[in-house]
Image (cartoon, rainbow, N blue to C red):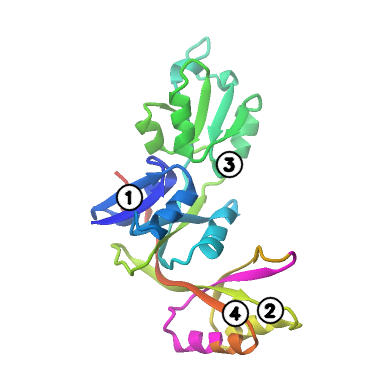
Amino acid sequence: MKRIALLSAGSVSHEAVRYVLGDRPAGLIHYKVISDVFLAVVNGTADYAVIPIENTIEGSVSLHMDWLVNEIDVPMRAEWVYPSIQNLVGRREEFVGEHGELDFSKVVKVLSHPVAIAQCRAFIAANLPQAELENANSTVEGAGTVAANPGLRWAAFSTRLGAERHGLDILAEGVTDHDNNYTRFVLIGADPIELPGKVDHEKTSIQVILPEDYTGALHQVLSAFAWRRLNLSRIESRPTKKKLGNYYFYIDVMVPGDSILFQAAVEEIEALGCQVRILGSYPCFAYEDSHTKVK
């Protein structure tokens, strides 16, 4: 049985890994902070780790991307998307109005992961303008803090699984600002892995560092893919953390790493004096709402 590191039990990461694994047995090892999730693979405590790297609404999760590229050297083995459905959770009896209805004006504080809070801004403005917002390491940690402090009229943005694990009520369902709120997850690990489900496409992720004294180098890099008609689904610049003004480019290419055209493109880019690092070549699984495996 493979050991898989991920964020806290009841988090979106937990729901997402249960979805992609289905009934396949795995030993899930939960951590409160993402650095420990990464390090579990590096030090051998886990075989794989589940990392959220991008969200429909908020874009890239910069901290996780920096860990993936700068802090560790563990390849990506699979990718999938999963809906980030947040709910307002708490103890219903603490927020009941005079006529038995829920009165959100009674909420004193809302706790959650900062990304989840950002995804619920419209709901907060309309229903919780008086509430203090407090960051937690994960959505389920926020729910746990609420559960541990009864009577204070605190609430949290959390998954349904997180609410169930801490004995909290769903006060409002689906409170994210957009219905198409999906998070992209990657599975990282030293060895390849076969997962159940339908593979939608193959992808290869690379890091490219341009030579400092080459004018127009980025144009040349993109041209190496363009004239070969290789589709790029993502290109993002991030600081190298070595020198002010120095950036690397994270690029997703929609082909497997053993593609002859891809390999030729990499050779051309390296000939320009660029540094190219393969971060992973992996299958991407499509999300099928009618076939959800979360139980």
The image quadrant of residue 220 is: bottom right
Is residue 265 highlighted in magenta? yes
Identify the residue at horizontal 71%, vertical 69% (top origin).
246
Q: Nearer the viewer, mark 2 or mark 1?
A: 2
Label 1 sits on residue: 18
Horizontal relation, residue 84 to residue 114: left or right: left
In the picture, the disc for residue 275 is: 4
- Labels 4 and 1: the sequence-earlier one: 1
Label 3 sits on residue: 114
The image quadrant of residue 38 is: bottom left
Is residue 273 shown above or below 116? Answer: below
- Labels 2 and 3: the sequence-earlier one: 3
Q: CA distance from mark 2 to mark 1?
A: 40 Å
- Please state the extent of the stretch shown in magenta in the rendering: 244-266
- Labels 3 and 4: the sequence-earlier one: 3
Q: Secondary structure at mark 4?
A: strand
Disc 4 to disc 1: CB gap under 8 Å: no
In the picture, the disc for residue 218 is: 2
Q: CA distance from mark 1 to mark 3?
A: 23 Å
Q: CA distance from mark 2 to mark 4?
A: 12 Å
Is residue 292 highlighted in magenta? no
Horizontal relation, residue 287 to residue 136: left or right: left
> Where the C terminus falls, by quadrant?
top left
Which amino acid type is marked by label 1?
Answer: Arg
